[in-house]
Image: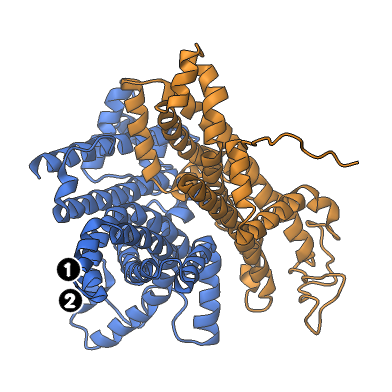
Chain colours: A blue, B orange
């Protein structure tokens, strides 16, 4: 496990370097002056510009410029937004938790719906139930997410009026920002209307989370189905049925555990996919998260914001990736061995 | 006069023909395939067949509902949008933008990806290992996010979207070709042709490529459905096709303000995207099914 941890840590450091290098090179790729792109100081006076050039070491060669950029990131200084001249670090700290909250809820929904359905399909392999689940899942990953979001708003918020159509919580409730994750903040606050606020926030999150969950859920269905079919063909399952265990005992005691392990390995990769879908969904549901902010920044040609937003978002995806790798290795001793090309 | 076969001749169809013979027997895949062909024809001839202009509207009849509605007009079969532009014509023009462009995108990235992939399969050592790690990092980033990054660098617009999606799809083709070529290289028939004195490029073009064409095609259908969704999503976000172009995603975003008054301006482009992606996926499923059946024989 120690060697595994060291391996992952070295991969982490290497990838972080690559990501910062990428975001550093973006400021040269974007049109305009590199120092202004990197700091976002569009209204800087000549004196300030000299100071900025000094701090980003533009007179020295590219390697020192990169080092200066790294030290700025380490200090948490991501520059100013070109559009609003506000500090990007603070904005991201306010926005990222909302995205994390939304994507985790969506991931949970996708897993709790997708995995059991996939198991059912595998157990009923080549029967009508299997075919129906497979066709529905194909429809699920073919549907464009923005269209699905609009249809969901039209049916569930406009026609039926069950859920609100936009935002994170009703403006009536004043919740102090502590962790940024709405549900924890509500529980921490000492407002007398705590539980009303809690149910309101729940009503707000259900619709976007379900829309995001559709595509990953269909992928979980396929993963669960293939891994269950593989497990059911192994010799230990045959041994268990030869021992005289009932079908239910075999499924619940042996098959599900071994099939689940194979699925957990893919959760990290699916999470990356899910965050991208969440970015689009945030735009439709006006969710105050980092995805919507990033897309608005692209629209406004706010290069500093794009650069930092991409860096933070890809770091976040990668951290989750590494975390699921650890969970997988902790659950499955076979995975801790030496693996090449990973 | 019919010429009967005098000699019993055994026919060995090529791998590609074998695949087609199995593919032809699955009805669902054939339905998907005919829809796919229909979309290709529409993408080529759509602008000629369209009854009205996609960009110039009839300002005196805005927001006409589809023809089956009581207020509908038969000459505007699927209704009009807020500027009186015929929805049917817009969708037909949009086929050549969303579907046609995604088809071209897939072909460009297929050619580049297969070239790089098969060349890289011939190399080994540090170059190959570097490429492998680099591909792993690139492949772990979702395609849409990567496309958004590239559009952010290049700036919004339909041609930049096309290049962005091409660049996003190339690594997938490189990856799959590399693995397939490496796998084939270990087989005996390659050894046989090497013993005959064939050089690596001859082996690659005469022995290996005909045998991996089916796997590349299966990847191409996956890439195509991703390309349609990516182009449409970028159009919807306002980063892809710009205002007058009837790209499906952009048309949908255009109808957004009138969603409650004229829901067909949102329903129809969405249905078109769904139809195109489902048709592509059905073809892909058919190919993968046929591959599996052929392997089990």
Q: Position of residue A21 (x, y in %)?
A: 33, 33
Q: Quadrant of the N terminus of chain B?
A: top right
**Nearer mark to the viewer, of 2 and 1:** 1
Q: What numbered label is drawn on residue A188?
A: 2
State which quadrant residue A213 falls in.
bottom left
In the rendered image, the residue lying farthest to the top is: B197
The subunit letter for the residue under badge 2 reads A
Give whichever of discs 2 and 1 has the lower sequence position. Answer: 2
Name above or below for residue A80 compared with residue B10: below
Asked if one can make out residue A179 in the rendered structure from this viewpoint, the answer is: no
Please name the residue shown 75% across and 54% down the image: B93
In this view of the protein, which residue sits in the foreground, A52 or B87? B87
State which quadrant residue B125 falls in.
top left
- Graded by Cα atoms within 10 Å as few (under 14), some (14 to 19) or many (20 or more), the crowding at tag 2 reads some
Asked if one can make out residue A207 in the rendered structure from this viewpoint, the answer is: yes
The subunit letter for the residue under badge 1 reads A
Name above or below for residue A3 compared with residue A246: above
In this view of the protein, which residue sits in the foreground, B185 or B187? B187
Q: In the shown orientation, is residue A166 left or right of residue B285?
A: left
Mark 2–mark 1 Cα distance, whole angstroms, equals 53 Å
In the rendered image, the residue lying farthest to the right is: B1
In the picture of the structure, the residue carrying the numbered disc 1 is A243
């Amino acid at each position: 496990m120690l060697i595994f941890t060291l391996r992952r840590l070295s991969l982490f450091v290497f990838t972080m370097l690559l990501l910062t290098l990428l975001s550093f090179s973006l400021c040269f790729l974007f049109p305009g002056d590199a120092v202004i792109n990197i700091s976002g100081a569009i209204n800087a006076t000549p004196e300030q510009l000299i100071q900025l050039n000094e701090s980003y070491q533009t007179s020295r060669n590219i390697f020192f410029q990169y080092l200066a950029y790294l030290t700025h990131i380490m200090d948490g200084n991501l520059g100013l937004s070109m559009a609003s001249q506000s500090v990007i670090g603070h904005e991201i700290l306010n926005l990222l938790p909302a995205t994390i909250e939304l994507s985790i809820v969506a991931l949970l929904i996708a897993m709790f719906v997708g995995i059991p359905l996939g198991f059912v399909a595998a157990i009923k392999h080549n029967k009508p139930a299997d075919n129906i689940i497979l066709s529905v899942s194909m429809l699920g990953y073919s549907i464009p997410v923005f269209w699905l979001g609009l249809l969901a708003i039209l049916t569930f918020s406009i026609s039926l009026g069950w859920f609100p159509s936009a935002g994170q919580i009703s403006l009536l409730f004043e919740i102090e920002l502590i962790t940024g994750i709405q549900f924890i903040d509500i529980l921490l606050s000492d407002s007398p209307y705590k539980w009303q606020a809690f149910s309101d926030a729940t009503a707000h999150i259900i619709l976007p989370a379900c829309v995001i969950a559709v595509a990953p859920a269909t992928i979980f269905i396929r993963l669960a189905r293939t891994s269950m079919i593989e497990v059911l063909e192994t010799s230990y399952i045959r041994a268990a049925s030869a021992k005289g265990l009932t079908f239910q005992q075999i499924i619940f005691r042996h098959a599900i555990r071994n099939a689940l392990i194979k699925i957990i390995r893919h959760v990290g990769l699916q999470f990356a996919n899910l965050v991208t879908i969440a970015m689009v969904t945030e735009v439709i549901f006006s969710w105050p998260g980092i995805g919507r902010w990033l897309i608005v920044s692209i629209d406004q040609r706010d290069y500093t914001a794009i650069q930092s937003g991409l860096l933070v978002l890809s770091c976040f995806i990668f951290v989750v990736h590494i975390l699921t790798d650890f969970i997988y290795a902790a659950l499955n001793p076979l995975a801790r061995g030496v693996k090449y090309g990973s | 006069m019919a010429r009967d076969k005098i000699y019993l001749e055994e026919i060995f169809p090529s791998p590609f023909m074998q695949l087609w013979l199995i593919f032809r027997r699955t009805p669902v895949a054939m339905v998907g395939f005919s829809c796919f062909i229909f979309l290709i024809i529409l993408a080529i001839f759509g602008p000629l067949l369209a009854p009205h202009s996609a960009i110039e509207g009839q300002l005196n009849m805005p927001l006409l509902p589809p023809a089956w509605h009581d207020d509908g007009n038969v000459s505007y079969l699927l209704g009009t949008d807020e500027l009186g532009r015929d929805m049917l014509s817009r969708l037909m023009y949009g086929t050549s933008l969303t579907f046609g462009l995604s088809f071209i995108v897939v072909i460009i990235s297929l050619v580049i990806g297969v070239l790089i992939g098969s060349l890289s399969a011939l190399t080994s050592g540090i170059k190959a290992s570097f490429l492998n790690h680099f591909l792993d990092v690139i492949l772990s980033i979702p395609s849409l996010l990567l496309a958004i990054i590239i559009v952010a660098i290049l700036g919004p617009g339909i041609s930049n979207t096309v290049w962005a999606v091409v660049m996003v799809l190339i690594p997938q083709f490189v990856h799959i070709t590399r693995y397939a070529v490496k796998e084939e290289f270990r087989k005996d028939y390659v050894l046989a042709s090497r013993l005959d004195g064939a050089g690596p490029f001859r082996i690659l073009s005469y022995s290996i490529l005909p045998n991996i064409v089916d796997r590349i095609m299966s990847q191409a259908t996956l890439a195509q459905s991703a390309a349609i969704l990516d182009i449409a999503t970028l159009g919807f976000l306002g980063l892809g096709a710009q205002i007058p172009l009837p790209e499906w995603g952009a048309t949908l975003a255009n109808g957004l303000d009138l969603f409650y008054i004229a829901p067909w301006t949102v329903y129809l482009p969405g249905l078109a995207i769904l139809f195109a992606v489902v048709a592509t996926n059905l073809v892909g499923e058919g190919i993968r099914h046929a591959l599996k059946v052929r392997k089990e024989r």
